Structures are given as C-alpha cells and as structure tokens.
Amino acid sequence: MPRFEPFHALRFADNGNLGVHCAPPYDVLSDYDRQQLAAQSAHNIVHIDLPIAVPPSDAYANASHLLQSWIKNDVLQRDDEPSLTLYRTSFTDETGKSRNIVGVIGSLEVVDEGAGGVLPHEQTTPKAKTDRLDLTRATDANLSPVWGLSTKIGLSALLSEPGEPVGSVVDAEGVIHSVERIVDKGRIEAICAAVSSSPVVIADGHHRYAISRTFRDEVRARTQSKDTGAELTLTYINELVEEQLSVAAIHRFYNGASDDDLRRALTQFYTFEAATSVDDKTLQEMNKRGSLVFIDDRMSVSWMTPKVGVFDSVRELDSARLEYALAGVDHTVGYQHGATEVQELVASGRATAAILIRPVSVDEIKRTANEGLLMPPKSTFFTPKLRTGLVMRELKTR
C-alpha cells in the first residue's frame, strides 16, 4: 500500500486575503480567466502555475525565479513542523442538496504503473504537452494536488475534528474552501496509517500523477537516490463514500458525423422521445427516467432511453454504452461538463450534435476500484474543483 506522509507545507503568509492569491486548477482556466486572476494580485498563484513569457521558453525559468523570490520575501511561508492539511468544501450540489466534504492533503507515494496501491479509475486522453513536467523541473515543487479517493472505511471520521484554521476562500460559484493545519503527531500518525492501509484511486489528476512518476525517475537517475522529495507527490485524499463525494457528468459533443448518422446508429439501442428545452430540472428528470438527452443541429431535444437487453454485455455506464452504440460510426467526440456550454457548441456549429449523460454513481466508482477496471475517458467530473495555492509542497531534489 502507498506511503502517505506529512511535509513542511508552503502557504501564503497573507492568509486573510487568500481569495486574490488562489486560483482554480490550471486545466480549467481560459486565457481570459488567467488574465483576470493575474490582474487581481501580483501574488496570484497563476503567475507561477501558468507562467507566460516572451520568448515562451523563459516562462518556466521565470516561474522558478518568482517562486523563490516569494519565499525569500515571505509572501510564502513554510510550516515550522511537518503537517497535514484538512481541506473542507461547503456548497450546494446540482440537485440542490447542501454538502460538506472533507479531505486531507499530504504526500502520497509515487508508485510504478501497474504496481498497485495507487490506481487509475478511467482511461486517459493523450496529452502531448510537457507543460506540467517542465514546470516541475523548473520549480522543484508540487503546486497543485492530485485528487485521490481512499477505500479505507472510517477515514472521514478521522478527519472530522477541526485542525488549526489557516484560511478560507469563497469561489465564483459560492463554494467555501477552507483549510486547517494538523501538527499533532498522534493525529498525523493515525491519519497517515489509515490512508496507507488501503488502495488510493486517482479521481482527478491522472496526468499530474504520471508526470510525478516521470520526474521521480529523472531525479533517481540524476541523484542515484531513492530518498528525495520526488518519491512522493502532493495529494488530496478523501473517503470513497457517497456523503464525501459530489460527482457530476461530463457530457459528449460530436463532429465528423451528421446528427442523422448519429441518431441512426443510436436508435438501434435507444428509443427517442421529443423533450422540452434543457433547464435546471433536466438532470433530475434524466435520473428519474433513466434517460440521456440528445441535442441535434437544429437544437431540438430528445430523451434517449436504453432499450431493454441491448446493453447486457456492457457496463452500466452511459459513457461505455455510447462508445458501444457508436462504434460503427466514423466520428470524433469531445467532452464538456456544463450543459449550457454543450448547447452553445451545437448552436454555434462547433458540434453537429451533443448528448447529455448522467453522473456515474459512487457504487460504480467503488466497483471500478475493487475490480481493477477502467472507465471510458472523461466519465467522471468530481466537484468542487480544488483551489491551487492553498497549500504547496517543495520537493528539494537539488
């Protein structure tokens, strides 16, 4: 099972003003988002986590220089003792339910692919860019956490007691993100032992975890040592249980085939029924009916309900069923979380059709973990997304 350890956390000293220092994850930010965040403060984390420079090759060197200057000038301060960080989110989910979720940030062991202990839960789409690897090489730091799910029963109870308050942020969606420091050695030992006793399933950050493995191997080759900070990576972990997870769907949009071609293939597996326009009640109705929603290039909306028996050999996942149903159609598929954004893609002509799917159940995520299976790419969207900048980790590999 993987090691999980405390570390000397790096945090913004101005913890009463974290809202202008922190940012959403790098991979959900547009250029405009980055520009707006950078304008908020000269010390917003995007200046380091999404560096820009002319020429671009200087961006990572600039990020490294900026990180060190922030540490030197006490913009960022290092915890005196090794600590764990409780990370809590309070919000209202897509169904209108109030949620309070807690996880813990520490250092998770970087294990070889296929070695067990740390498991992927879905297939990943290729990412040719070396951006995160180049940034890690330059800064020698983990700036944002991987998100892992622990199969250890009772982990949430160990995290329920508050720690020492550090600060909080309210994001644009009204989600409250708050962090608390744990320095009590007995409590740290109990939490680390619990996490290390069971497999961890990667929920979000598969690419960052893979980059950590590549970087670890580079450091081993350079230092001839397996005792550096690269052996572990910054990770947020919460328990794989219904009350501690909020899972949204990642919808599908299509190109390379007409909506008629798509519908022709899909009618072998689904019945189509005219529906009204998509609104904030659509997700609840989809769950109630057991249906998906098809949006054609005329913006007409239809319920898609699986026919009895046609998917007996396919896993009970909308994403897997759609792959199966469209296997004989020449097309490309894209992924988008927001239903409004999906409709805009079709309305603007950037997609020929789209399908809204239902969130994956926590029971199915558990089954995936327990049976060592992989879901199709972009099957799950775990929310709320963790803020970058609330806690960082230096690797000290040089």
Image (cartoon, rainbow, N blue to C red):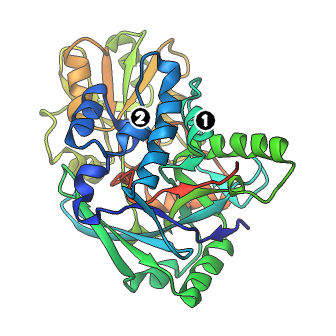
Q: What residue lies at 47% left-to-right and 14% top-to-bottom?
A: 331
Q: Position of residue 334 (x, y in %)?
A: 41, 24
Q: Position of residue 194 (x, y in %)?
A: 62, 79
Q: Amino acid at mark 1?
A: Leu
Which of 147/309 is in front?
Answer: 147
Q: Is residue 34 visible?
A: yes
Q: Secondary structure at mark 1?
A: helix
Which of 396/339 is in front?
Answer: 396
Q: What residue lies at 36% left-to-right and 55% top-to-bottom?
A: 75
**The image quarter in which residue 103 lies:** bottom left
Q: Position of residue 148 (x, y in %)?
A: 54, 59
Residue 269 tag number:
none
On screen, residue 262 above or below 174: above
Q: What residue lies at 20% left-to-right and 42% top-to-bottom?
A: 40
Q: Is residue 294 left or right of residue 310?
A: left
Quarter of the figure that contains the N terminus: bottom right
On screen, residue 259 above or below 175: above
Residue behind mark 1: 133
Q: Residue furthest right?
A: 224
On screen, residue 227 above or below 137: below
Q: Is residue 176 visible?
A: no
Task: Report if the CB atoms under discs 1 and 2 are less than 8 Å apart.
Answer: no
Q: Earlier in the sequence, mark 1 or mark 2?
A: 2
Neighbour class for label 2 at 10 Å: few (<14), some, many (≥20)?
A: many
Q: Position of residue 300 (x, y in %)?
A: 18, 22
Neighbour class for label 1 at 10 Å: few (<14), some, many (≥20)?
A: some
Q: Amino acid at mark 2?
A: Leu
Q: How many marks?
A: 2
On screen, residue 144 above or below 106: above
Residue 50 tag number:
2
